[in-house]
Image: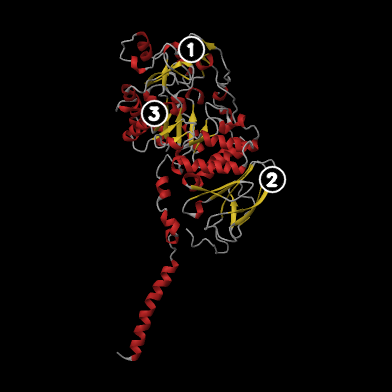
Amino acid sequence: MSSMKMIASLLLAAAIPAASLAASSARPASAESYANDSDRAVAGRYEKREGDWRNGAIVYQVLVDRFAPSASIETKRHLYPSPKVLRRWDEVPTRGTYLADAKLWSHEIDFWGGDLRSTLGKLDYIQGLGADVLYVNPVHLAYTNHKYDAVDFKEISPEFGTRADMQALVDSAHAKGMKVVLDGVFNHMGRNSPIFLEAQANPTSAYRDWFVWGADFPGGARIWMDAENLVELNLENPVVRDYIYGKPDSVVQGYLAQGVDGWRLDVAYDIGFAYLGELTRAAHARKPGSLVVGEIANYPKEWFPHVDAVMSFTLRELILRIARREIDVQTGQRMIERLVSDAGIDNMLKSWLMLDNHDTHRIATTLPAPSQRRLAQVLQFTLPGSPNLYYGSELGMVGAGDPEMRAPMRWDLVKDDNAALAWTRQLIQLRKQYRALRVGDIRRIESSQLLAFERYTDRLRDAVLVLANPSDKPVTEVVLIPDSKFMNMSRLSNLLDPDAAQVPLVSSTITVTVPAESVLVLGPDISAKAGYSPYKRVQ
């Protein structure tokens, strides 16, 4: 080969990798190629959480009788015989008198006439809010309006409809991308149940051992919380447990087979660790991925895995006390960190975080000051958990003790200019936009005067910083952001007020001013300025 040809050949060989390099550099690298060691250590964690509908879901709770007026109310009047009373939809519940013969209060048999079909007719509203789960208070055959006194767990109360109506509701919810969770009341039954009446009348009845008898008990049988209408089931009897959850045709398994996605268990603490564990395992065996959430106001640590989740009463209490300045921010920060650490983040993500429900004052009554209420709501939507919205509270409905908090839904308040509704929608959209709020971990942001934390995943673009100031004065403070991916000299955007000025980040610190009784929610601005971004090689 001539020297000229050799030189040409070498130049050609050298040009090939150079061209390939130029082509490869023009192609954008995948985000994963910029993962650091910490990212690789948690690879798949957040995708796995996202694949489980129970994590970080938005739950919307309804009382069937009070949620939506029935279109067939005139044909249903015979279902409310005296002493039951059928009220007008615009009437407000008031506390009644105790009916000694019936062993209950008169307001427990005041009805407003809602049913499963009318609830189905409002699924578009619930879906439009952004709810992922419809939680339905008890619908079992029972005497009262609240149905916590079951007569027959396997039947639907006729005022509400039939099992076919229940099926239609479930199918329609599923078609709209929502799950359905029913309220299970398995610690007790109603005194009117045929099972109890037979057991009471006949000491040799096969149902006698379904209850606990004793001369010292009011009415002769053990009751729940001094309520004579609510006789406790003897769960130590394996036949009872088989009926409730053990057998394929049991209450728990039967409704799951019908398409229901989970159970919220009333007074789950009364059922106890062992039987809750049995029930949860039975539910999972019948329908893998189903949800069992317990009404457990206790400290939640040891209740897992006996249930998948709890009603987050402890975290609710901390939020309300922080908002009312009954707990200073540093103590509140430590309490929340301890709670999440002891319970476990994955259990907390599934647990329902409510500010109110059918057993509490509505949030607009508990926190009448709008600024305090908004602060609490931001924490509800940014701390780990599944926000549980009680029907009508998104509209600003008020209500104190039972039965005021169970007033019929104020559909007249569903308007675009309803500030409470607009605020709730904004919080829901924030949560849907940022993965970290749904399935992310949590860590402290170092601050002395603010309740401050970060929700984060393995991707910077998911990160959300929350800085809450419950005090009655503005707070200006320099705080440390302990996240290595936040780049020096970049800026943070106000996620609740996009028009607000951005916050400069300098060497992992920011200087913020948080107004009194408010929350600053920040996220990284990863947009390129003049074609340049410091985040171009950060996952």
Q: Tell me the crowding category of disc 1: few under 14, some 14 to 19, or many 20 or more residues within 10 angstroms, Cα based.
A: some
Q: Which mark is residue 16?
A: none
Q: Quadrant of residue 240?
A: top left
Above or below, 282 relative to 427: above
Between the C-alphas of marks 1 and 2, the distance is: 53 Å
Between the C-alphas of marks 1 and 3, the distance is: 34 Å
Amino acid bearing label 2:
Pro
Q: Which mark is residue 168?
A: 3
Judge by depth and name the residue closer to the eye, 386 or 326.
Answer: 326
Residue with the mark numbered 2: 474
Amino acid bearing label 1:
Lys
Residue 406: percent from the left, percent from the top?
A: 54, 24
Image quarter of the N terminus: bottom left
Q: Is residue 400 left or right of residue 303?
A: right
Q: Answer yes or no: do the residues labelled 1 and 3 have beta carbons within 8 Å? A: no
Residue 86: percent from the left, percent from the top?
A: 51, 15
Residue 417 appearing in the image: no
Residue 227: percent from the left, percent from the top?
A: 48, 17
Between the C-alphas of marks 2 and 3, the distance is: 52 Å
Q: Residue at x 46, y 40 (%)?
A: 343
Marks 2 and 3: which is nearer the front? 2
Mark 1 element type: loop
Residue with the mark numbered 1: 103
Tell me which numbered mark, 1 or 2, is placed earlier along the sequence: 1
Q: Answer yes or no: do the residues labelled 2 and 3 have beta carbons within 8 Å? A: no
Tell me which numbered mark, 2 or 3, is placed earlier along the sequence: 3
Residue 384: percent from the left, percent from the top?
A: 50, 42
Mark 3 element type: helix
How many numbered marks have been drawn onto this rendered protein structure?
Answer: 3
